[in-house]
């Protein structure tokens, strides 16, 4: 049985200006002990999916489809059952640690609260153990969030998410605003925890290069939909969707000076989700768009098999055309 399964998930925000479809027909499966990366630009729906998994969306948001945790639909759970599932079956590391932690409570107390609510035993000792597990000295438990560095606060959030031994950890932009050295330390910590504890990890970020080194599988989102998915290294090195190619090309390649001197960006911005263009949402920015792209919104379909690159799917009219 899968730890997490999204079946035709649709999330629509209701605003004064009308309905805004943030997630459109997403299907995604995460197996026990597996690491899956979710990539895309800001506004493509990644964080909405993270919030949808644990029913953390704003009141009034319309959600259709299914979110299954260990085979149980999160949106069919009663409040008591939902409360029991959060932090025990699945937990989340939010982006922006300074805004996620309570500024007037010591970090140790915040970790203890989650333990007392779900386990009730050895809360203080367990909180210290968790801080030490993520590389922080026990004394940090007595500090307030503002007394810690950005990297230390991020480690506190990871410790908090692990407080009740969840099977699934959702990491939503866990390295945002961290310098390169601290980012590497946080990534190494997540990899170690995932390996030692057998965690299933859903890693969300805009940085394809980070996901390539961290995750086994990769799903790329654009305008609320998954437009490409497959083994992470294969998707990054030989993308099938032009959007994925543009994302991959925007990062310099280690050992290739030319990629640093002449980085290739992606012109324009993602479309307004409340006013999506007809056909493929990416066709306005796509350098290989053809007339059919203005009318056809292609669903995910199997890519042509290439030696060593199996299980590839992409939502593009060009997918299925043989490539050398």
Image (cartoon, rainbow, N blue to C red):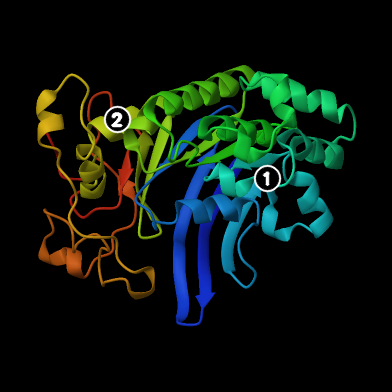
Please tell me whether mark 2 sits on a helix, a strand or a loop.
helix
Residue 220: image quadrant is top left
Asked if 299 appears above or below 93 in the picture, the reply is below
Residue at mark 1: 71
Q: Determine whether the residue tagged by mark 1 lies in a helix, strand or loop.
A: loop
Q: Is residue 62 above or below residue 263?
A: below
State how far apart marks 2 and 1 are (Cα).
Answer: 29 Å
Is residue 85 left or right of 57 when viewed as pictured? Answer: right
Q: Residues within 10 Å of mark 1 (few under 14, many from 20)?
A: few
Q: Residue 14: image x %, image y %?
A: 53, 75
Q: Position of residue 280 (x, y in %)?
A: 25, 63
- Relative to 280, 148 lies left or right: right
**Which residue is at a point 24% across and 49% down the rendered structure image?**
243
Residues tagged 2 and 1 counted as in contact (Cβ below 8 A): no
Residue, x 70% and y 33% (percent of image)?
A: 143
Which numbered disc flags the more N-terminal residue, 2 or 1? 1
Q: Is residue 234 visible?
A: yes
Quadrant showing the C terminus: top left
Locate residue 236: give its quadrant: top left
Is any part of residue 3 visible from this angle? no
The residue under label 2 is 234
Image quadrant holding the N terminus, namely top right
């Amino acid at each position: 049985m899968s730890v997490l399964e999204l079946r035709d998930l649709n999330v629509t925000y209701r605003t004064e200006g009308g309905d805004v479809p943030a997630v459109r027909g997403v299907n995604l499966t995460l197996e026990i002990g597996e690491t899956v990366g979710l990539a895309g630009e800001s506004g493509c729906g990644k964080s909405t999916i993270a919030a949808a998994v644990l029913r953390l969306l704003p009141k009034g948001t319309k959600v259709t489809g299914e979110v299954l945790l260990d085979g149980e639909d999160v949106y069919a759970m009663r409040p008591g059952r939902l409360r029991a599932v959060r932090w025990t079956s699945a937990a989340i590391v939010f982006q922006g640690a300074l805004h996620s932690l309570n500024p007037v409570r010591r970090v140790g107390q915040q970790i203890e609260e989650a333990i007392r609510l779900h386990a009730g035993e050895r809360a203080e000792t367990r909180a210290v153990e968790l801080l030490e597990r993520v590389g922080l000295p026990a004394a940090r438990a007595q500090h307030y969030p503002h007394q810690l560095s950005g990297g230390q606060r991020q480690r506190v959030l990871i410790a908090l998410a692990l407080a009740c031994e969840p099977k699934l950890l959702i990491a939503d932009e866990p390295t945002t605003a961290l310098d390169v050295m601290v980012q590497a330390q946080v990534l190494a910590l997540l990899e170690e925890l995932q390996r030692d504890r057998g965690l299933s990890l859903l890693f969300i970020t805009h940085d394809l290069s980070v996901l390539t080194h961290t995750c086994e599988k990769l799903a790329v989102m654009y305008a609320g939909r998954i437009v490409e998915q497959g083994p992470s290294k294969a998707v990054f090195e030989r993308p099938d969707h032009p959007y994925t190619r543009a994302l991959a090309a925007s990062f310099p390649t280690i050992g290739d000076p030319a990629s640093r001197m002449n980085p290739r960006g992606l012109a324009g911005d993602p479309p307004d989700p409340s006013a999506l263009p007809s056909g493929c949402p990416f066709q306005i920015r796509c350098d290989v768009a053809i007339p059919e792209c203005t009318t056809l919104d292609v669903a995910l379909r199997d890519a042509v098999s290439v030696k060593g690159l199996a299980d590839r799917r992409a939502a593009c009219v060009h997918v299925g055309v043989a490539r050398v």
